[in-house]
Each structure stands twice: as C-alpha cells, then as structure tokens.
Image: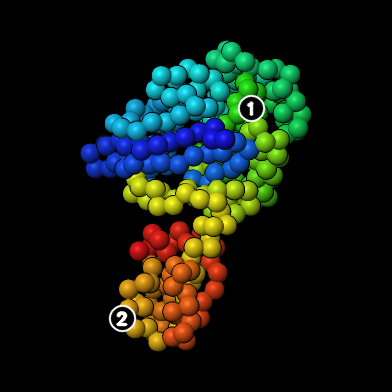
Amino acid sequence: MSILKIDGLCKSFGTFALDNVSFCVEEGTVMGFIGRNGAGKTTTLKAVLGLVHPDAGVVEFTGKAVKDNELFVKQNIGVVLGGVDYYPTYKIKTIAKVTAKFYDNWDWALFDSYLEKFNLDKNKRIKDLSAGMKVKFALAMALSHGAKLLLLDEPTSGLDPVSRDEIIGIFIDLIADGQHSILFSTHIISDLEKCADYITYIQDGRIIESTDKESFAEEYRVVSGGVLTPELEKKLIGVRKNSFGYEAMIKAEDEADFVSAGANTQRIGLEDIMIHLERE
C-alpha cells in the first residue's frame, strides 16, 4: 500500500520546472530520492508538505490530497533536514517543549524513549551536541508525534562515516516494524546502497527512473574496450575517452552486442550510474 503518492506533479518557476513528477512510497520501505543539486528534490519535498503549490498534479498522503488536508499532513509527517541549527544555548528539553505545542499527538513517553535509545541527555545544550547527535535529536522529535512517514533532506550531510553508519542503522530499525516509511533525499549514494529499498532518480525536474534498488542497478553496465562501431557508439551513456580508449555506461539489454565486439563489461554501482547519467 502506498503511504505517499505523487502523480503528474508540475510546477514552473520560470527558469526551472517540475515536469510530470510521479512516484509512490510504499509502507515499510525506504525510498532513495537522488539527483544533482537543482534537479527538483527539495521542491518535490516541499510540495509534499504543502509548502509549494503545484500548477498541476496531485500529491496524496494516506490517500488524502495534500492541498485539502495540509494540517493533517503536517501533523502526521516527520521532517529531518541536514544542517539545521537550533538555538545553541537552549537545552534539548526546552526545544522539545516548544515543538510539542505544534502537534496534537505528541507523546512525551515516546520522546523520552527515543532519547534513551539514542543516548541523548535532555539537559544538554544544543551547542554541546555533535553533528550526529543533532540528527538523532531531530529524529527523536520527528518520531514523537505519531508520524508514519519521514521526509529526510540530506540528514547525513557533513557527518563522519561512523556517525552516518549509525544513523543509517537507525533508519533500518525504524522501518522494520512495517509501519514507518522514509523518503530519503541525499547526495551520499553509499548511504542509500545500505538502506534503500527503492530508488527514484530526478534530472532537470523530470523523473528518469523509479523502481526497486536492485532493478535500477541491473539496468546498466559499465563498458570499455573492444571494437567501437558507429552503431555501438550511439548506445554509450556518459562516455569518457582518453589515450587508452574509453569508458562508458550502457543499458544491460545492449551488453551482448558489446561483448560480441570484444568489449569488457561489468556491473555498476548506484553512484557511478548517477555520474554517467549526469555526464550524458
């Protein structure tokens, strides 16, 4: 069942536009939302929250249209943004007390349980928290008012690898109950390789692909060498040539043709897929 459905979303800003953006986030899954800066990720997330009003299309949360149920949506979605600074001299408990006033279903017992789980002291001041601890604090607040969907916009940006791995572990644990879902926008593709079930790729405001992670990776191969005929050259994606030859990406369906021409092919990771698509 889809907890979030985006169908035909269009929004023009003059020099940039979302063009027929459509994808779904299923219950109990992590959807990785990827694309380069300015591709439309944050604008799409803002549309989900009702902060951007589309020119066309529908955004539905639990089957309800966002445009007609903005208060309901904001009450039931948790948001975690990377690089957000709270008042540095305030204590965790003070910021939580202010935040709780905005949510009808705020659960203090649940909030305290997350603080304990994340090893956070409610009496600590924000300025004394590490970057990773700030993300955990934001997660604790996002999960303490009954939210079933988390919107994560670069939450692990700036964290060291150990802290990122710990946060990713928390995401995996959250969806294990089948009742929480995550829409995870990030440039750190290695994080998605660890936790994402699905990948949605956006480029210049258009969705290029939205499918399960394994199928997305299986669609492409990296290729080099062999006899490069004009027909084969047309099938190269994001080619890079040098004095030793070339390296490019191809669709998996074309792999046999390149192998027959003596080329070397191998599987390719999510990050390299993104690099080749953007190079194209």
Q: Is residue 75 above or below residue 8?
A: above
| Residue 88 in view of the camera | no
* Amino acid at dot 1: Leu
Quadrant the C terminus occupies: bottom left
Q: Secondary structure at mark 1?
A: loop
Q: Which mark is residue 21?
A: none
* Colouring convention used in this rendered image of the protein: rainbow
Tell me how many marks there are: 2
Q: Farthest residue to the left: give it.
A: 14
Q: Upstream in the sequence, badge 1 or badge 2?
A: 1
Find numbered disc 2 in the image and state the secondary structure of the residue it sits on. helix
User: Does residue 79 appear in the picture of this structure?
Assistant: yes
Res 102 quadrant in image: top right
The residue positioned 70% from the left and 39% from the top of the image is 176
Query: Where is mark 1, residue-wise?
Result: 143
Q: Residue at x 47, y 17 (%)?
A: 71
To which quarter of the image does residue 251 belong? Answer: bottom left
Crowding at dot 2, Cα within 10 Å, few <14 / some 14-19 / many 20+, comes out as: few
Residue found 59% across the figure and 43% down from its top: 30
* Vertical order, 10 against 186 (above or below): above
State the residue position of label 2: 230
Residue 64 locus on image (x, y percent): 47, 24
Position in image of residue 228 (x %, y %) = 37, 83
Locate residue 65, reporting x and y percent. Answer: 43, 24
Give above or below for 45 relative to 235. above
In the rendered image, residue 274, in percent from the top left (x then y), is placed at 45, 58
Q: Which amino acid, mark 2?
A: Pro
Quarter-of-image position of residue 152 = top right
Q: Nearer the viewer, residue 101 or 231?
A: 231
Q: Nearer the viewer, mark 1 or mark 2?
A: 2
Crowding at dot 1, Cα within 10 Å, few <14 / some 14-19 / many 20+, comes out as many
Q: CA distance from mark 1 to mark 2?
A: 55 Å
